[in-house]
Image (cartoon, rainbow, N blue to C red):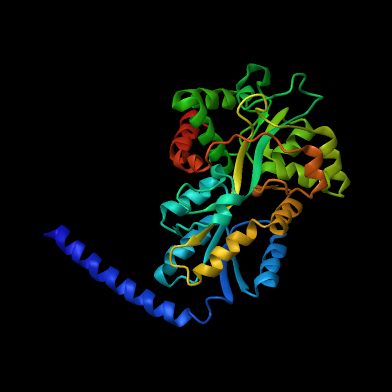
């Protein structure tokens, strides 16, 4: 009886929702082509060029709402069926997965996106698309470390006892890295790895990625893990203090002799109740054109997802590492287990 009532209530609510949507669609039809509401969690100030480029190309005005990933997801959920959000942009497949679990996205597909974006960098059902990539890789101080690390597995080696610096186990970049270790080594192997890495810690996890790199330069740590663009930002900086850091720290592209470096994405999806779905799809397609891809590579030193686009001289200098080509949605699926393992081994 109870379940029937619940089902009935559900049907009534759904009918109301459909009617509501129908009237919204009519109200917005005139505006559908000239406005787009973007909720963005990318914390890089160069993105304004991306948005400007889209408006110049299409005449579609962008209304931008910025916040961190969790805030924006909560906001869209709060706004419910009336949310003005068309697009959610966020970094890391782990965060895209969290949004996906909340039902934030609707599936979209287009020949342009399928041609331009390699399949391992997009959601299998088209719920979101990776539009730029970042490698989470290794750094070391040659004054401290004789034999540099070549792989993530090396971080567990006893030769790095008391030398490893990496940020906290609650950080989504680390959860995704851990998720990939689970995918490669299984739960048991990944747990053993994490345990040994914790045993090699130079200090309790603290700070962001740039702080790990700086701690390698200062000698507090011998090796560290950080996303590549944080290091390249220091390389491109005019600040003498940043240049000093770069002088002391070497970057290593991880696992180049086997599966490739751990790669994650900045990703974009169309929100389930998007009032401007056509403009939203046009925007995602725009992000894969050569100009937009160059904004990513020049602005934040990320890698393009589209092959052959690479105007950034510093990126060219460091080269394109061989990426680990596992579908990045795995990082979301393995995220709960990754967190459990971090908690279990005391990776705070
Ligand atoms: Fe970042």
State left or right for residue 81 relative to residue 141.
Answer: left
Q: Let me know if residue 74 appears in the view.
A: yes
Give whichever of 301, 95 is nearer the camera: 301
Q: Residue furthest top?
A: 158
For the point 81% across and 44% down, the residue is 314
Q: Quadrant of the C terminus?
A: top right
Question: Which quadrant holds residue 48?
Answer: bottom right
For the point 59% across and 77% down, the residue is 34
Q: Quadrant of the N terminus?
A: bottom left
State left or right for residue 47 relative to residue 217.
Answer: left
Locate residue 45, reporting x and y percent: 71, 60
Locate residue 100, reporting x and y percent: 45, 53
Give whichever of 132, 235 is nearer the camera: 132
Locate residue 301, reporting x and y percent: 74, 48
Question: Which quadrant holds residue 194?
Answer: top right
Relative to residue 176, is residue 77 depicted above or below? below
Q: Let me know if residue 169 appears in the view.
A: no
Q: How many marks?
A: 0
Relative to residue 36, is residue 287 depicted above or below? above
For the point 63% across and 31% down, the residue is 260
Locate residue 120, reporting x and y percent: 55, 42
Give whichever of 240, 96 is nearer the camera: 96
């Amino acid at each position: 009886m109870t379940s029937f009532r619940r089902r009935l209530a559900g049907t009534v609510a759904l009918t109301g929702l459909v009617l509501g949507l129908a009237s919204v669609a009519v109200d917005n039809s005139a505006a559908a082509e000239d406005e787009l509401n973007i909720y963005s969690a990318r914390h890089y100030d160069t993105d304004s060029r991306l948005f400007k480029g889209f408006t110049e190309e299409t005449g579609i005005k962008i209304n931008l709402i910025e916040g961190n990933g969790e805030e924006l997801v909560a906001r869209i959920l709060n706004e419910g069926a009336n949310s003005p959000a068309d697009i959610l942009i966020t970094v890391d497949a782990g965060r895209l997965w969290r949004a996906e679990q909340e039902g934030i996205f609707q599936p979209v597909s287009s020949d342009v996106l399928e041609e331009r974006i390699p399949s391992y960098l997009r959601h299998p059902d088209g719920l979101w698309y990776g539009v730029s990539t970042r490698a989470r890789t290794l750094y070391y101080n040659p004054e401290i470390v004789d034999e540099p690390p070549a792989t993530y597995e090396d971080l567990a080696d006893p030769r790095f006892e008391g030398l490893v610096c990496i940020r906290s186990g609650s950080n989504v970049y680390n959860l995704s890295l851990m998720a990939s270790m689970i995918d490669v080594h299984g739960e048991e192997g990944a747990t053993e790895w994490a345990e040994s890495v914790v045993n090699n810690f130079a200090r309790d996890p603290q700070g962001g990625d740039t702080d790990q790199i700086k701690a390698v330069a200062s000698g507090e740590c011998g090796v560290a893990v950080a996303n590549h663009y944080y290091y390249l930002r220091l390389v491109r900086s005019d600040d003498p203090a940043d240049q000093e850091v770069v002088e002391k720290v070497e970057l290593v592209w991880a696992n180049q002799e086997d599966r490739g470096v751990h790669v994650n994405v900045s990703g974009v999806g169309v929100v389930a109740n998007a009032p401007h779905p056509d403009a939203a799809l046009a925007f995602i397609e725009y992000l894969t054109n050569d100009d937009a891809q160059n904004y990513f590579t020049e602005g934040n030193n990320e890698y393009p997802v589209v092959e052959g686009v690479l105007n950034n001289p510093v990126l060219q200098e460091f080269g394109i590492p061989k990426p680990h080509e596992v579908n990045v949605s795995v990082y979301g699926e393995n995220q709960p287990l990754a967190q459990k393992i971090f908690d279990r081994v005391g990776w705070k």
